[in-house]
Image (tube, helix red, strand yellow):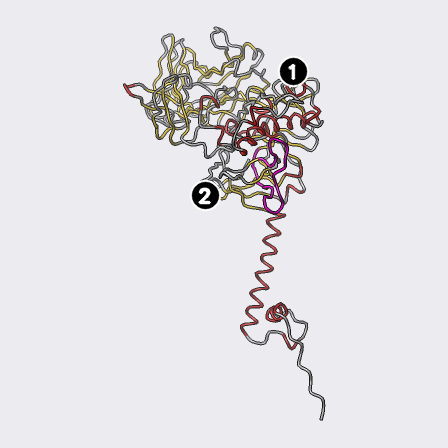
Amino acid sequence: MPDPVPPPPKKDSAERFWDILGASDDPAELPAVEWRRRLHRFCENWIFALIIAFGIRHFGVELFRIPSASMEPMLLGDPGLGKGDFVVVDKLTSRFRDVQRWDVAVFQYPVPEIESGKGGRARPAVAADGTRLDDPISRPLLGGNFVKRVVVLPGEEFYIQGGDVFLRNGAGWAVARKSPELQERLWQAVYRAGDQPGYRPWAVEGGAAVELVGERLELKPAGGVVRFDQPLRNVYIKDGSVAVRRLGSSDGYVRIDGVGLTRPRFAWTGGVEGSIWQLDRWDIKRLTSADNDDPSRGTQVNQLMNEWNGDLRVGFRVERLDGEVALILAAQAPGTPVAERSLALTLRADGWSLAGSGLAAGVSASGQGPLAGHAVDLAQIDGQVVVRIDGREAHRGELAWADPNMHRPALAFTGSGSAVLAGVQVERDLHYTARGFLQRAPKEAGDPYGDQFSQIPDPEDRDNTYASQVRLPREVRAQLLAKPADELTRQEATSAYGTGPDHPARAPQGGYLMLGDNSPHSLDGREWGFVPAENLRGRGWLVVFPPQRWRVIR
């Protein structure tokens, strides 16, 4: 009698699972019934799809939600789900293309952080006494992504003044300019005639007259002046609601709804009218700081937005023109009778001419052709003057720069004729405020930890305070000077950097300065320094949600 055939070895659960999927090498064990064949095809297709999806996400494109208002109005941000823009990040082309100035870049936050125990966004991973708080298992470092605009490239010498970024140009300095295509996307309207019925920020002098009917501005300078009296400050407020009280008053704040940059007027008790632009009369707060990169910046508009804008554009469509009317853009120190710099665009029925005085002496241009029915705009932008007719450039020339915080911008119409202008609009450029390491010096090298920090009872509050006031400013100084932070001398630790031509800063090799378009509300390179090249994740490409915001990012 032949020996019995031994039973096949028993398979473990893993081997049986792969047999079901058809991964066995034994043809007899391939799936034989229909449900196994379907399961095999399903798993094969989805595993392949997941591999492709992960590959695309890692090497190609990724969806990123804008969580804060630091890049507004280009990219809208809000911590509430569905309220911020959803952006497609291009990771592929950035592998083959160098980062360009003015790119909107997504990068990993360069400061080590861990999850906050108090419900905040994060806390420093380095305690005030120098102890590392992170642990790869229990308290891993956060890899949060930020989105900002690339402003300074590695190795460049720069400073920020009057809202502009200046770069070393040989023995001198030059404003970092945007391309005309990019600049067109960055203009932000601060006044549009007719946007808010009843709002008429025009004052007259010397017998002049002005009427605003809808969006039509009827001008009769008659040898006098029609002056734009809305302050040209660096103000940005989302359309919506603010809290207002009289400046210097101890009264409580009153909620004002439905205001914005081009709808700034509100009614106050006793028939008094106010405007959110009048920061010298009204104490204005936003209702929440939740859309800030850092809620500690607070809601106070007056303190954050007290600088003045010098890069402006004024545009309109000429409906009727009799005689001569001149549009004046001036820069004038408060209390002085003569403008430091002035541009006059004179309009006539058969053409236009441009002339400058003061620092703009020598600026001259002209054009022929009827203006009635045509759009005209005049801009002073990044050390240049630009005239356009119907959106086409008629003149571009160099213009001496004037600091708007010392010589405040002003806009007016003069002349002996009259005009009817439709759709008058005033726009401003990006304006970078000089905060962070550009103004605040850290504690001197060698100073001890200090009682002022040890007396803060909560450990997380103590670490946050120490990081913002000492550690981060000192580390940024160390980056600027390419030396260890604990070797900074007294002068190196306390001197100003990046605030003017006498105190420039230099970006380290391999480090980029990233700034937010909404400069007063942005936690950016002014606070935590430069972003290493290896932290770059890609370039913002498209806004894909919400649908009404779909656009290519510039």
Q: How many numbered marks appear?
A: 2
Residue 195: x and y in percent read: 37, 28
Amino acid bearing label 1: Asp
Closer to us: 243 or 441: 441
At x 34%, y 18%, the residue is 211
Closer to us: 140 or 335: 140
Amino acid bearing label 2: Leu
Question: Would you say residue 296 sits in the magenta stretch?
Answer: no
**Circle 1 Cα neighbour tier, 10 Å, few/some/many (<14 / 14–19 / ≥20):** few
Closer to us: 75 or 29: 29
Residue at numbered disc 2: 81
Mark 1 and mark 2: span between their CA atoms? 46 Å
Residue 494: x and y in percent read: 64, 19
Quadrant containing the C terminus is top right
Instruction: Look at the image and give the residue range highlighted in magenta.
Output: 124-148
At x 58%, y 41%, the residue is 142
Going from the N terminus, do you reach mark 1 or mark 2 first?
2
Closer to us: 78 or 149: 78
Residue at numbered disc 1: 502
**Circle 2 Cα neighbour tier, 10 Å, few/some/many (<14 / 14–19 / ≥20):** few
Residue 440: x and y in percent read: 58, 21
Quadrant containing the N terminus is bottom right
In-image side of 375 versus 178 (left or right):
left
